[in-house]
Image (tube, coloured by chain):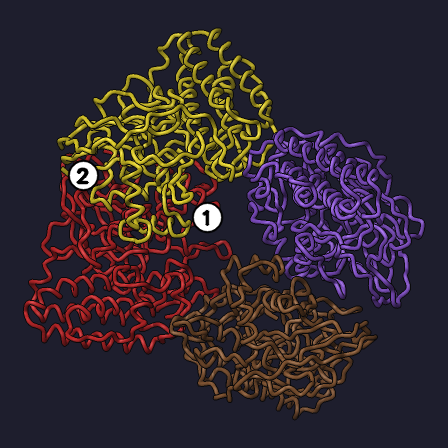
Chain colours: A brown, B purple, C red, D yellow
Amino acid sequence: MVVSDPVASASDGASSESREPLRERFEQVREFTLLLCEPLAVEDYVLQNMDDVSPTKWHLAHTTWFFERFVLQEYAADYEPWEVPYDFLFNSYYNTVGAMHTRSRRGQLSRPTVGDVLRYRREVDARILDLVSGCDTQTLEQLAPVLTLGCQHEQQHQELVLTDLKYNLSCNPLLPAYHEAPKSASAISPARQEWVSFEGGIREIGHAGPGFCFDNEGPRHEILLRPFALSSRLVTNGEFLAFVEAGGYERPEPWLDLGYAVIRTQGRGHPLYWYREDGVWMQYTLGGPVRLDLAEPVCHVSFFEADAFARFTGYRLPNEGEWEAAAADRPLEGNTAERMRFHVEAAPPARGVFSQIYGDVWEWTASPYTGYPGYRPAAGALGEYNGKFMCNQYVLRGGSCATSLSHLRPTYRNFFPPEAQWQFTGIRLASDA
Amino acid sequence: MVVSDPVASASDGASSESREPLRERFEQVREFTLLLCEPLAVEDYVLQNMDDVSPTKWHLAHTTWFFERFVLQEYAADYEPWEVPYDFLFNSYYNTVGAMHTRSRRGQLSRPTVGDVLRYRREVDARILDLVSGCDTQTLEQLAPVLTLGCQHEQQHQELVLTDLKYNLSCNPLLPAYHEAPKSASAISPARQEWVSFEGGIREIGHAGPGFCFDNEGPRHEILLRPFALSSRLVTNGEFLAFVEAGGYERPEPWLDLGYAVIRTQGRGHPLYWYREDGVWMQYTLGGPVRLDLAEPVCHVSFFEADAFARFTGYRLPNEGEWEAAAADRPLEGNTAERMRFHVEAAPPARGVFSQIYGDVWEWTASPYTGYPGYRPAAGALGEYNGKFMCNQYVLRGGSCATSLSHLRPTYRNFFPPEAQWQFTGIRLASDA
Amino acid sequence: MVVSDPVASASDGASSESREPLRERFEQVREFTLLLCEPLAVEDYVLQNMDDVSPTKWHLAHTTWFFERFVLQEYAADYEPWEVPYDFLFNSYYNTVGAMHTRSRRGQLSRPTVGDVLRYRREVDARILDLVSGCDTQTLEQLAPVLTLGCQHEQQHQELVLTDLKYNLSCNPLLPAYHEAPKSASAISPARQEWVSFEGGIREIGHAGPGFCFDNEGPRHEILLRPFALSSRLVTNGEFLAFVEAGGYERPEPWLDLGYAVIRTQGRGHPLYWYREDGVWMQYTLGGPVRLDLAEPVCHVSFFEADAFARFTGYRLPNEGEWEAAAADRPLEGNTAERMRFHVEAAPPARGVFSQIYGDVWEWTASPYTGYPGYRPAAGALGEYNGKFMCNQYVLRGGSCATSLSHLRPTYRNFFPPEAQWQFTGIRLASDA
Amino acid sequence: MVVSDPVASASDGASSESREPLRERFEQVREFTLLLCEPLAVEDYVLQNMDDVSPTKWHLAHTTWFFERFVLQEYAADYEPWEVPYDFLFNSYYNTVGAMHTRSRRGQLSRPTVGDVLRYRREVDARILDLVSGCDTQTLEQLAPVLTLGCQHEQQHQELVLTDLKYNLSCNPLLPAYHEAPKSASAISPARQEWVSFEGGIREIGHAGPGFCFDNEGPRHEILLRPFALSSRLVTNGEFLAFVEAGGYERPEPWLDLGYAVIRTQGRGHPLYWYREDGVWMQYTLGGPVRLDLAEPVCHVSFFEADAFARFTGYRLPNEGEWEAAAADRPLEGNTAERMRFHVEAAPPARGVFSQIYGDVWEWTASPYTGYPGYRPAAGALGEYNGKFMCNQYVLRGGSCATSLSHLRPTYRNFFPPEAQWQFTGIRLASDA
């Protein structure tokens, strides 16, 4: 998701919503973004410590620009842009609607200030709410799906606000905490690992409505599965540490050739945010440094690390068809952003079922990110860019502790390059039946 | 194939060959490599003008080392290595059998000289032939598959000798020719383009024997296809030039995001080896510079260029399942290395069938290179590395004018990164039915 | 000066100052730094838009750390560091006193916040003033030179605060102003250029006291000069524009080989901060964008540009001996930081004398920065690093509109690499007599 | 000298030579170049293993092109270039006479072959000799200085042939020898080190004729020296090893800031070509690997290493004025290229005099390379480039074991960037008196 804003399919059902739920949904989503910023100092909003992350200030402004550009400028009579240069500064990659500021230079800007951006947000919010309340029904039907899309888009950026902040703060030798993390009851020992079996055959995956989805979740289509098994829970820190301590990073055998080159070149020897202090394995979290909890799911591993770990243990990663087929009838629940923990939790005791599905960590699949058969991006600027990122990325499923549950679905396809570590990403093992 | 040596499955049938055909096959393959080198000056053997290519001298030595290391050292009694440092210099990436010289520095070596390497080849060849003639039947059964694999491996390097030389010579402002190319009867106009339709349903792809295959061609397995159509012939230079002249490289719409970044960063505006001279489009070939023939298949395009062209025209690239299903019952014939032309030819007149399948150019598919369901690399050094390259590469099918026909099969899977241009790579369009 | 903190010679006369002037000087210098920061938003303090510049926040903290480390920790009884990690974060390159944070990562830190740093400043200031007031005479004699050095050091960083901010803000497409610049009476036309002649012979240069100097200003020593002439005023924007418009950047003749490589590689075609808008030459200043004033001195040119311009016009740059000999008896006055303009001014009408000597722009000399004969760095941490930067840099003389007059002397030697543009640097022409 | 061809002053006395000595000199110099190539395999001529070195083939062709371009094309009636593209391929940096091939790509060319280049040499040689024999006296007077310059130019490239080959061959893990080195009588112990004192005062340096010099050797001019002392001999391997073993490369104190960054970034811990094998210090030489001889002068150190060693020992490097004043009346003799050893020799026993002046190693001075007072490059293409390299380089004096004695003079100024190691460069210590 780092370089993309997956956009909505044309067929989402948002246009049938009435005005009030639309307003409420909009206000809730916008409010939650500000809630995430509450612990920040002004200085925190400015940082961009690698090209892949953006300053918090940019996220606040870009999500606002999205509503301004695609709702107000399209549907509000005589709307004039708040500040003309914002169209340049806060466009992400919608080439059709104009030129844009270079991604890697977002951290070079001190102006507009955080205060300026918050004023911009408030003004756009007021205008959006006025528009939704006051427009005619035909306009409402047209703008409702765009507004819904804008909310989903903002939820994606809420997750990025957290992951980007975590990265930015982690570069500071003081290792400052983002917030005071809620205490979690640490497991005495990790839940037992079990295998859950699934039958093969022709299955359907992909979104078929009703409700919102991004266009890359469709069309719904048949796939052919072979019998398979999935682990009942995520791989733990303890299990991954065993791989580290067995010299897993020191020899090429378990690694993809490209992955081994990456860990050699970058000198990686463990997941991102792990470090040793006086012989003790520590981990930087949004609550500051903590001792590594061996019962918790391993987090901040790249696809390369997930894949190498799986091969080392004799198993493999699931493909996305397997994952979706297995998840299809499981309840939508988990350790997600609403809990405001922004950190993983140890799995509940095993009960022979596929669990820890939503929340905690995005699960790397073995599936390169490509378009489903018959996939066509939507027309116009909003549909212009969705398929653009279907190259050299892998699909992740299930959401993380920084994803809102209201943003998740069994069909949701996230995607990142195989070397990316800074998202809340982890490992679920699979096996041929 | 740039970073890999796909290796044989354990189940190839080579062990049932008798001694004489084995010797003959070995001698033919080894002889053909030397035939390819005949036009060269000593200086030509040394060049490595980008990391992805290797000096001809290295190819000659590495293929020899393969036989020395995996046949002579394993099966010839009391065999002593020809030169101990060759094990270091001419190993490509078989980590299990030892350390190796850095790939990007192969062009830094003037010694061993070409003469030294040719002596090495002759010596190893003689020892191999002696061994095949004189060993007991049990040893023969063991070494036969390795020898067959070595011959297939050498055929892969024969193609690389040609593509690497083409690249190396193209960097010389004098644009020297590799050989005097056979004259081709230039088409007055390109063959008509037709669509050939194929039914959907469950099909099988992958190799099931008898005969040799690389392990990535198996296991044979079922796939689910939707109805589709393939173009009767390859995309021509004239068709691709229309894309260039319509500003295809100047705007982001048809491109994958990563592809557009590559052409912007590298300043690409046309296929590799095209250039304009006094307003005329020219093309560097192994026969030297020639005027661009609009009826010939376009060649030396990357996956990014193939994909962008397909999107621009409203079609798409085939996936590898479609390609193999369509090719399964077509004759194995085409403009391949045996003809010693090493350049594409215009398509024959259309007859409503799927043609230009083998030879001319490797056809980019839309399929990321991954393991087939149930794929397991063979055990030991020879199987150690095959799956290692299944990341950020795309499958190509059909072979090129630099591939030996005796090296090709419908199930053959070649693979290169999406930005690679220096192989003989081209485009076949596909469409949903 | 970019990578250095030239430090005081052991022989400066500061120890003879009484307490009160020492306190006053300290308070004035510290206050002026804060005055420079008044126009800033919090966000402005964080930026580091190239490796050579530092965030304002870092300058505020580093200058404070200097006093804490070299005065309080050395002379205040039982002093405990304010925050232990500050010793790591705000050390610049004093290896002897400990490890330090990587220079290029100073912009990665949001904490300590600006507020934290200001508290740190206030606390250290109070402790310093207490110490000066309360210490015994012997201690006062020891710490006085260090305190004086710290004030000179802070004045250097005051200039960097301005030049670094100018660079950081210039990267913002909004081109925000740092302050509202005082209006200047623009000259109708530039002052006439005259040559001022000087005799040759043996002269003395270098500092011989009394008063403070950095150790690189000594020892005072004899040099042998040949007769020479210096331009009465600095080169103007109009004169430099003529060079630009004559294609001066397009052909190699006037350039040093290295300089031509730099302008080719970086695509430079004019001084830093110049740009064209609708056919008009504009210039970014700390007061925001203004039309280029042709009568003003050209500014923000590198040594390479200064040298090429001189060669193009048939003259040369002065060497530092010539400059110092000529300046030795001229009044210490000019357009310096005290005026709070931070922008150059057109020269006064020519009167046949060497003028525009101090302030406006640092004048590039032809002299590589080396140690004077007999130069020895002072002992200990403060003297450890001064000679370290005597390589691949050129001497500049005279100070700029961002330098405090109280910081300047005829013997002052500033130095920057030949490609540096972001200081207020300009050109004075010289000629053999 | 790496990026330059210092050219002759207009005032050399060559024009008074008669035809025969001019022909003889030309033939001797050209012959010696071929003699240096005798040990090579064809493959050796092609390598360019870093940007700073050139292939032997290029040196052979470029020196020939120099005579063709500046003698034959200027003075031979109706001369037609041998091959037009050679003007592009073998021009080094004479922009005035046309565009040129990129320096860093000289190793990308296999054609023209070594045979082609040798034919080119023979043809040009024959034409030059014909021209010298047959031209009228006025033409002879004009071409004689250019021919003399071409011979001096070729002698510079003879040294580069050796140093570039040494570097190229050293990258080969086989460490092949260039030739079978003559045996040297290894010293039992190094000669005693003594200090030789010199008086201060006004001295003259620079070339004043008669005979050839490069334009950077003039004008002869007065300098002011302070009393100084020079070491009687060069620093030995044993002395430098003591610096290495005392951790000289591990701590910043003795190093220039830029030098310490270079050794840290590049991981240097000893002079180029030193390595340890089984606990023994070895050294790669043109005769192949040998055990490090502690009595021999240290060689292949950069300016940074020379400067750090001097500071570490409490001394300094001489400046070029000191060196030239000291060398002015010493005999022109030493271990130079005529001896065909191409390796340093231990100093003869000390006799209280300044010795090991010429040959063995170029001695780094503390003097940045700048133009002498009044220096003006000659007019036209030959004078176009000499001053171009007077930036970020240091002067070296005395010649090396790879320099011809007939190429040396007391006034000769060689120059290289402070990080360069691949020339035969060493250290002479100096001290204030």
Residue D118 sits in quarter: top right
Look at the picture and state if B223 lies above or below D393.
below
Q: Is residue C50 left or right of residue B133?
A: left
Q: Position of residue D77 (x, y in %)?
A: 53, 13
Parent chain of label 2: D
Q: Position of residue D232 (x, y in %)?
A: 21, 31
Residue A20 sits in quarter: bottom right
2 and 1 marks on the same chain: no
Front residue of D154 and B333: B333
Residue B119 sits in quarter: top right
Residue bearing the label numbered 1: C269
Q: Position of residue D174 (x, y in %)?
A: 51, 37
**Is residue B266 visible in this depiction of the protein?**
yes
CA neighbours of label 1 inside 10 A, class few (<14), some (14 to 19), many (20+): some
Q: Position of residue B63 (x, y in %)?
A: 68, 41
SS label for mark 2: strand
Front residue of D68 and D428: D428
Q: Is residue C51 left or right of residue D131?
A: left
Residue bearing the label numbered 2: D431
Front residue of C71 and C432: C71
